[in-house]
């Protein structure tokens, strides 16, 4: 017969169910996807994480270009293992494989719910492991759900789903610490550490620090000798070292991928105002630059009441309360802020360690209730502390009209539940009151955060008709590896090649290689996110260089607020392009200059542009002033840029710092969204022209326009250059998930150039690959007609060696544990 579930198991299941239902209820109230018309794909969720999960879907179904090591779809070929280890290595990510391809947004939402429920169950299991609390397991379930529904989870991590792995990791690592303290389950504890660090190393680091604090407190509170305490710490340290070592094959490439990435934002840490900190403990508040500390009135009241609870030993009360206070202070002090964040201030939200504090508060709340229900004196002391927090929050502008009504209703329900529970006669009613208070406040906070994110952050439409049309157009035009198919400059996200297919230049990641950003920007590409999100290059010269033989053109995305909808149909343009591997003369001194037109010519190996002198005048006829030696300074208003081009030219405008619109004569207006250094506008075509030209600029924000802003492309010269590269290029190219093999014409000499950025990890012919103006290059001697270039992410070999050593160490630990167990059984 089947064994019925234990009270602990039922409590964990209740916590998971409560947290998932509450999140869904909050999203339904906000009419957020999938319960309404409002998208939930804000910020990096829509711009990064959904496209990366789409790439994982392609990998799981054998439809991706490339593999786990090399991503052929983004940035003209980039390393994928660092991205996998940062965004996709959680076991929960595999759930996307069971959803249809066009339900990728729903799949990511399901992953988010699964992680939230698992975090609630894990915390419930931890609480009942720290102190069984027999008969009060339902209270542990409510507190476990409280932890999973903390403000950090429903306000911030919900659109950074890989952070939720840290929410799961903290209670699991605390369990591993408990086992190390008592000398139990050494192998399972090590594997839990490995799983946490593989799933998301960033939050796992913070969770490990928090679990270490919990372990120290537990060692201090237990009646053991100093030797036993030291041995417990030693076992815990061994568990962490072996666990992290087993994760090294993923961690080392991730670390080195970060080291080779283009530098992002540089921010100085600024502590939050204390009234704002107090306000974030209350429901229905939102802020990007203060810690999301909301836990619900029940957990907050019980944690505050712990210091007054005489049924709990005095030392235990003081230690847990002191630990919470110290961690609160550590959030606000610069040195400890850096310690929590691995000595690097985050580019975005600066209080990413808040989930650890939430977990500690929940543990303190459970300590207050697990021994005995709080008496009236205890509740009075805790209530006064909560009232002081609420009073301090009144000075914060973050408090909304819903904050105090929700807080008061929750406080009344919690006090009633605790009074009823203490009598022992109305346990069911007490449970319903406590669950209702927590679920109601958390659902309201979730709904409020859903609406606030849409008002304050960029947002992206879920997969719909636009993506279906774009993906179908890419699939029809695909000819990889004979040529690349670019999904187009009119992007829906910065990772369109991952979302809808193709092999484009667009790419957005924490690991965007420095060489990729610098090379493409030298050629005229735009960017956002301070250079981490590189945009597509819609230009015939760079299309020839990177073998883009088909390009999809979409109408502007109506979901983006800066776009005016247009009626253009979905079209595909094709052009003859050289193969992926071409041959150039040996030139060891080539380097990029300032002008993207001249840089494109260097990489192409032919002169195809005329770059004329320009004159820029304001609407009143006055000349635009210079800013430095190379740029005009512009302010909001209308300007006319004059230049002269040869007859039958295609005119391009390069203005990376221009925020506004440009029009050549009566041609279609081109928009520029530059605002250096955060945003860089890409080189754009204005139309056909010749002779004296007048380009009208409508400037919306102050910026600059280069003196050499206009380039006049000669299409016939470009066609000749392309024909020459095709004639001398590879006769056959084969690509794989780890490299390229090219067959060259017999007797070919010079430098073979692979149309892939020279990121770290490329080797050709068994030697590190060279660089030709930022692209992978290798010398050709003429006697070897085959070129083999392979890619291995930096750190993979070293990580594998460390992982193997850790595996041997774990085997030794397992063997020692078995021998010790046999000796005890024999004795």
Image (tube, rainbow, N blue to C red):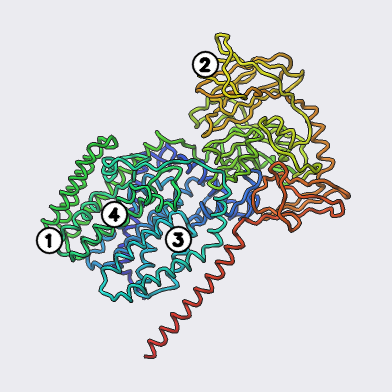
> Could you tell me which secondary element the residue under label 1 belongs to?
helix
In the rendered image, which residue does mark 1 sit on?
A: 423
Describe the element under mark 2 as helix, strand or loop: strand
Q: Confirm or deny contact between disc 2 and disc 4 (CB under 8 A).
A: no
Q: Which is in the foreground here, disc 2 or disc 4?
A: 4
Are the residues tagged 4 and 3 within 8 Å (C-beta)? no
- Identify the mark nearer the N-term, 2 or 1: 1
Report the residue marked by disc 4. 326
Task: State which mark lies toward you, 4 or 3.
Answer: 4
Q: CA distance from mark 4 to mark 3?
A: 25 Å
Q: Earlier in the sequence, mark 4 or mark 3?
A: 3
Q: What's the CA distance linking mark 4 and mark 1?
A: 35 Å
In this rendering, position of residue 799 left or right of residue 389: right
Q: Secondary structure at mark 4?
A: helix
Q: What residue sits 50% from the left and 21% below the top?
A: 700
Q: In this rendering, would 334 be left or right of 191?
A: left
Distance Cα–Cα, label 2 vs label 1: 74 Å
């Amino acid at each position: 017969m089947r064994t019925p579930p234990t009270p602990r198991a039922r409590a964990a299941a209740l916590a998971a169910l409560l947290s998932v239902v509450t999140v869904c209820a909050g999203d339904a109230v906000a009419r957020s996807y999938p319960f309404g018309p409002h998208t939930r794909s804000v910020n990096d969720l829509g711009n990064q994480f959904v496209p990366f999960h789409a790439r994982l879907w392609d990998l799981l179904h054998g439809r991706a270009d490339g593999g786990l090591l090399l991503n052929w779809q983004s940035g003209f070929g980039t390393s994928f293992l660092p991205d996998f280890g940062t965004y996709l290595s959680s076991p929960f990510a595999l759930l996307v494989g069971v959803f249809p391809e066009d339900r990728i947004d729903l799949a990511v939402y399901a992953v988010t719910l699964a992680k939230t429920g698992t975090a609630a169950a894990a915390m419930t299991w931890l609480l009942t492991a720290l102190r069984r609390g027999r008969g009060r397991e339902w209270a542990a379930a409510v507190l476990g759900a409280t932890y999973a529904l903390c403000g950090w989870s429903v306000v911030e991590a919900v659109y950074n789903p890989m952070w939720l792995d840290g929410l799961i990791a903290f209670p699991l690592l605390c369990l591993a610490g408990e086992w190390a303290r008592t000398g139990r389950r050494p192998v399972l504890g090590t594997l839990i550490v490995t799983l946490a660090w593989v799933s998301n190393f960033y939050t796992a680091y913070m969770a490990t620090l928090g679990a270490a604090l919990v372990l120290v407190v537990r060692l201090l509170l237990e009646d053991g000798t100093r030797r036993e305490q030291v041995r417990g710490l030693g076992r815990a340290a061994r568990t962490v070292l072996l666990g992290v070592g087993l994760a090294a094959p993923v961690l080392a490439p991730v670390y080195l991928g970060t080291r080779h990435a283009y530098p992002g934002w540089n921010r100085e840490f600024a502590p939050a105002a204390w009234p704002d900190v107090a306000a974030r403990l209350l429901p229905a508040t939102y802020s990007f630059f203060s810690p999301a500390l909301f836990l619900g009135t029940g957990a907050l009241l019980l944690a505050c009441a712990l210091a007054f609870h005489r049924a709990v030993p005095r030392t235990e009360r003081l230690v847990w309360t002191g630990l919470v206070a110290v961690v609160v202070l550590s959030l606000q002090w610069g040195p400890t802020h850096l310690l929590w964040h691995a000595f690097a201030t985050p580019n975005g939200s600066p209080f990413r360690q808040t989930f650890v504090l939430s977990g500690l508060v929940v543990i303190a709340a459970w300590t207050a209730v697990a021994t005995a229900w709080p008496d009236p004196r205890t509740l009075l002391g805790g209530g006064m502390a909560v009232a002081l927090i609420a009073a301090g929050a009144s000075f914060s502008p973050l408090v909304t009209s819903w904050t105090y009504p929700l807080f008061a209703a929750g406080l009344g329900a919690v006090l009633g539940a605790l009074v009823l529970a203490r009598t022992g006669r109305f346990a069911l009613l007490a449970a319903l009151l406590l669950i209702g208070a927590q679920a109601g406040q958390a659902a309201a906070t979730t709904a409020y955060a859903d609406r606030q994110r849409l008002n304050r952050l960029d947002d992206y439409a879920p997969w719909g008709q636009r993506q279906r049309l774009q993906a179908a157009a890419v699939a029809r035009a695909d000819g990889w590896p004979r040529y690349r198919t670019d999904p187009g400059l009119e992007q829906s996200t910065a990772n369109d090649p991952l979302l809808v297919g193709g092999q484009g230049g667009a790419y957005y990641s924490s690991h965007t290689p420095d060489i990729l950003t610098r090379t493409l920007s030298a050629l005229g590409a735009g960017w956002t996110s301070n250079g981490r999100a590189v945009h597509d290059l819609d230009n015939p010269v760079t299309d020839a260089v990177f073998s883009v033989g088909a390009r999809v053109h979409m109408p502007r995305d109506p979901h983006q607020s800066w776009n005016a909808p247009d009626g253009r149909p979905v079209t595909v343009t094709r052009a003859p392009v050289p193969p992926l591997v071409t041959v150039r003369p040996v030139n060891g001194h080539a380097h990029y200059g300032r002008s993207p037109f001249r840089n494109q010519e260097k990489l192409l190996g032919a002169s195809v542009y005329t770059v004329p002198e320009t004159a820029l005048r304001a609407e009143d006829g006055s000349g635009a002033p210079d800013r430095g030696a190379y740029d005009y300074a512009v302010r909001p208003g209308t300007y006319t840029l004059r230049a002269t081009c040869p007859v039958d030219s295609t005119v391009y405008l390069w203005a990376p710092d221009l925020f506004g619109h440009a029009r050549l004569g009566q041609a279609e207006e081109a928009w520029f969204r530059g605002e250096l250094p955060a945003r860089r506008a890409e080189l754009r075509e204005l139309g056909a022209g010749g002779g004296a030209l007048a380009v009208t600029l409508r400037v919306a924000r102050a910026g600059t326009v280069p003196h050499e802003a206009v380039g006049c492309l000669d299409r016939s010269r470009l066609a000749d250059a392309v024909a020459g590269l095709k004639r001398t290029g590879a006769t056959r190219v084969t690509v794989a998930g780890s490299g390229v093999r090219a067959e060259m014409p017999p007797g070919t000499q010079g430098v073979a150039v692979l149309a892939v950025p020279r990121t770290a990890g490329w080797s050709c012919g068994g030697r590190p690959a060279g660089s030709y103006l930022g692209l992978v290059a290798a010398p050709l001697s003429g006697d070897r007609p085959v070129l083999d270039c392979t890619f291995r992410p930096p750190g993979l070999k070293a990580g594998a060696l460390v992982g193997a050593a850790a595996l041997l160490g774990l085997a030794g630990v397992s063997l020692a544990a078995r021998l010790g167990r046999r000796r005890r059984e024999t004795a």
